[in-house]
Image (tube, rainbow, N blue to C red):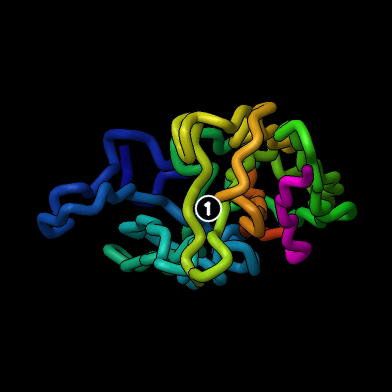
Amino acid sequence: MSLYGRTDSTPKRVDNNIAASSQAKTVVFVDETEASLNENKLRGINGPGWWSYFTYTDSSGNTRHKAEKLVALGNADTNANETLFDDAIAADVASSVTITVQPASATTSTGGATFTLTTTTTGTPGTLTYQWQRRTPDSTRWVNVTGTLDGSIYTNPTTATLTVAGVVNTTLNGYLYRVKVNSTGGTEEVISNGLATLTFGT
């Protein structure tokens, strides 16, 4: 298949051009239309061609992007049917996510608490994905919430609703919570700006 073919199919991948690294990198094909989208420019993908791409979470809990152009193409054709492995990286169409209801703080005497948020979308972003994070009151570092964090008190940390199990643990007083929202269609990440605080009452 020609390098200038219309899709980013496996026979055209150029993985052997990527230097060895501890990071799991993905080879991404970006056409002219994708290269013009702000979602991709914010990821550092600013032109058509083949890109080496990976993300990482910095000490503040934010997702960072690293993109390196491998091969530049002058006439990368567009194809509305492109559905291969990089679609969650290189957005195919302009889209955005807006958090319309921010997570709210919770005070509980039984230990049970639920944080929720509501989102709206424009364009065709695909399926929304969520990752809740928490921060201790004396830290600036956000940590991804998992089912085993803080004594396994959390459920649904990758959905729109985070639940704290019904146990009283005053050592968690003042813990802050936020959520990062992405999509399978490459929409740029949005982080809730309303920080929810958990307080255990008596």
> Which residue lies at the image location 80% right of the left edge and 53% below the top edge?
105
Q: Hey, what amino acid is under mark 1? A: Ala
Q: Choose top left, top right, bottom left or bottom right for residue 21.
A: bottom left
Camera-side residue of 190 and 192: 192
* Residue found at the far front of this picture: 202
Is there any visible trace of residue 92 in the rendered image? no
- Dot 1: few (<14), some (14–19), or many (≥20) neighbours within 10 Å? many
Instruction: Find numbered disc 1 in the image and state the secondary structure of the residue it sits on.
Output: loop
Region rendered in magenta: 193-202
> Is residue 32 within the magenta segment?
no
The residue indicated by pointer 1 is: 90
Is there any visible trace of residue 152 in the rendered image? yes
- Horizontal relation, residue 197 to residue 36: left or right: right
| Residue 5 x %, y % | 41, 44
> Which residue lies at the image location 86% right of the left edge and 48% below the top edge?
120
> Which residue lies at the image location 26% right of the left edge and 47% below the top edge?
24
The N terminus appears in which quarter of the rendering?
top left
Camera-side residue of 30 and 108: 108
In this view, 134 is above or below 81: below
In this view, 44 is above or below 99: below
Camera-side residue of 139 and 71: 139
| Residue 15 x %, y % | 20, 47
| Residue 49 x %, y % | 40, 61
The C terminus appears in which quarter of the rendering?
top right
> Which residue lies at the image location 66% right of the left edge and 49% below the top edge?
181
| Residue 197 x %, y % | 72, 56
